[in-house]
Image (cartoon, rainbow, N blue to C red):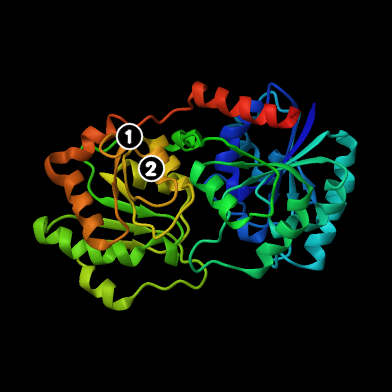
Amino acid sequence: MTVVYYTSTSYLDVIVETIQSIKNSVNLHVVIEIAPSSKNSTIINVNELESKEMIETPENLLGKEKWEELKPYFKDVASVEFVVQKNKRAFSFETIKTAYKLGKYLKKYKADILHFDSISTCAIGLYFYARSKKVFIAIHDPVPHSGEASWREKIPKKLFFPLAKGFFFYSEFALKQFEKYYTRVKTALYGIKLQPYTFVQTYIGERSAKPGYVLFFGRLSYYKGIDILLNAIPIIVKELPNQHFIIAGKPDYDFKLDETLLQKVKSNVTFIERFLSTEELVKLIDNAQMVVCPYRDATQSGVVMTTFAVGKPVVATNVGSFAEYISDGVNGLLAEPDSPSIAQKILEALKNDFYADLQKNVEPNFSKQTGDYNASIIINAYNN
């Protein structure tokens, strides 16, 4: 069975773990979309795309050193290629044309199955290629997060959903959410599981003897609940005046931090409002007492999988699929999505260094059991 597995650099940290489950069971060709909006991610950091060809090898695009780091994850994969989208507008004639040309290029693989791990607007031009294939689609966010809805994201769904023979979800929550909002879709739905993003372990250096802060990281957006955390901090520092926090990430969807809230907590918080390299991010996580996710809503979270890969616990709100990956009081703590509850849980983790006990229960490595489970679900879906 030959499979073309199409994804984006935005999801590459997920994909390098997922394909471990299936790469020895099928003839697997991996195609990774890179665009101006996704040329910097947890794994990928490319300076410019203008000089690149439409189809690039990983070594030409990433450089020899970065490709050598990634290469072990693609061992036994039939091919790995990047499709380069250069237009800053994801929905444009140029992006449609590039994806259409990619479809013609992919015909040489004579694939039985086209597996999308999320469909971007840039992939619209692949529609004509997809019509002749058995299509499967992995969906990360069935419903847009609060403050992030866009009409452009509806277009690939309208085109590709009717072609799908099955949908994959990385959490039971996402699957149920899809069932609720897409009642007309009668295609088979399959749940698979995330693994810790082990690639980031490459950057773990010398560990600090005493972790020094609570960390929030990731792009800054309304649904991430930054204001919930900022309002929780005064409650925490009332009991622990010297407790420090770091909030690291780049604002997205025109999100802006509330200046009034910032003034209240400025003596206890360091803000790093920019994109972080993987090396910088891993160092921040590694020297943190814990990572906090005060989200208003969520499906599954790459922040949790990245944090677990570094071996640190997470305090998160009990929304989305957090409870599927965080066992309350074991490898992290779960709070309600409000400031008093977040404050109480962070204090619980900090007092008597309870975060260190939680850390002992964090599993940072690829689980063969989970990998075998994912393989059985995916391959059975292909064959069904």
Name the residue rendered at 37%, 62% in the picture: 225
Residue 113 or residue 50, whichever sits in front: 113
Residue in front for this viewpoint, 161 or 365: 161
What amino acid is found at the position of numbered circle 2 in the picture? Answer: Ala
- Classify 10 Å Cα crowding around label 2: few (below 14), some (14-19), many (20 and above): some
Task: Report the front residue among 268 and 179.
Answer: 179
Q: Quadrant of the C terminus?
A: top right
Give the number of marks. 2
Res. 170 image quadrant: top right
- Residue 12 in which image quadrant: top right
Which residue appears at 19% of the width and 53% of the height?
Answer: 344
Question: Does 151 appear above or below 73?
Answer: below
In the image, what residue occupies the spot 63% across and 36% down?
A: 67
The tag earlier along the polypeptide, 2 or 1, is 1
Which image quadrant: the N terminus?
top right
Residue at the spot 70% in from the left edge and 22% down from the top edge: 25
Q: Which residue is mark 2?
A: 323
Residue 114 horizontal/vertical position (percent)? 77, 40
The answer to which of 260 and 147 lies nearer the viewer is 147
Give residue 291's position: percent from left, percent from top. Answer: 32, 48
Question: Where is residue 3 drawn, in percent x and y?
Answer: 77, 33
Q: Is residue 244 visible?
A: no
Q: Residue under circle 1?
A: 206
How far apart are labels 2 and 1 at the CA level?
31 Å
Image coordinates for residue 202, horizontal then vertical, percent:
47, 34
Residue 197 visible here: yes
> 168 left or right of 202?
right
- Extreme residue toward the bottom, this view: 260
**Circle 1 SS class:** loop
Question: What amino acid does circle 1 point to?
Answer: Glu
How would you rate the neighbour count of disc 1 (Cα within 10 Å): few for under 14, some for 14-19, many for 20 or more?
few
